[in-house]
Amino acid sequence: TLSAAELQAVLSHERAHLNGRHHLLISAGQVLARALPVIGLFRQLGRELPGLLEMCADDAAVRLHGKDTVARAMVVMSTRAAPDGAVGLGGPGILARAERLTRQSRPGRLSWIGLAFTLICLAAGPYLATLPPCPHPW
């Protein structure tokens, strides 16, 4: 039911998973979540990492095929039942991912300025911590 362009977008998405070795990252996140459940960061990592890696693969497919093609392919794939033994694309996350693709925009100049300011502050922090305290009593 996919068009040729949508099929290529789906294949690009899956290649991004393979090239990024996302299956290994998900396994590592699950191991950390199960081995150290008392650390909230690792519990959260086990839950959130698969969705974040899906968005990463979506972005890789968008760079090659465009937002609209990838979003259409996601909608078509989510309306079909997965074959036996395959992972389905449905679920509540698919709508959020499709909406993200259709409204996503590049960061503006203000975002880059904020990032640069943050990096400068982080780099200057250790230096400023080594300065002697202010000698003035006020």
Image (tube, rainbow, N blue to C red):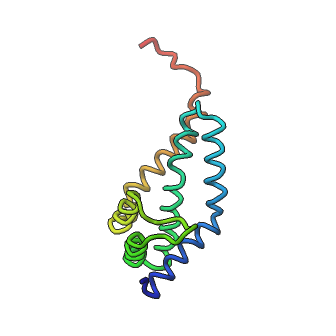
For residue 43, above or below residue 29: above
Q: Residue at x 41, y 73 (%)?
A: 80
**Residue 62: x percent and y percent?**
46, 73
Depth check: 52 or 127 in front? Answer: 52
For residue 112, above or below residue 40: below
Q: Residue at x 52, y 62 (%)?
A: 56
Q: How many marks?
A: 0
Q: Residue at x 63, y 54 (%)?
A: 25
Where does the C terminus fall, quadrant-wise? top left
Quadrant for residue 111, please give it: bottom left
Depth check: 13 or 37 in front? Answer: 37
Depth check: 10 or 106 in front? Answer: 10
**Residue 131: x percent and y percent?**
59, 26
Where does the N terminus fall, quadrant-wise? bottom left
Q: Is residue 80 left or right of residue 125?
A: left
For residue 27, above or below residue 68: above
**Residue 20: x percent and y percent?**
63, 64
Q: Residue at x 66, y 44 (%)?
A: 31
**Residue 6: x percent and y percent?**
45, 81
Q: Residue furthest bottom?
A: 4
Q: Is residue 135 left or right of residue 92?
A: right
Depth check: 64 or 7 in front? Answer: 7
Q: Residue furthest top?
A: 137
Quadrant for residue 79, please give it: bottom left
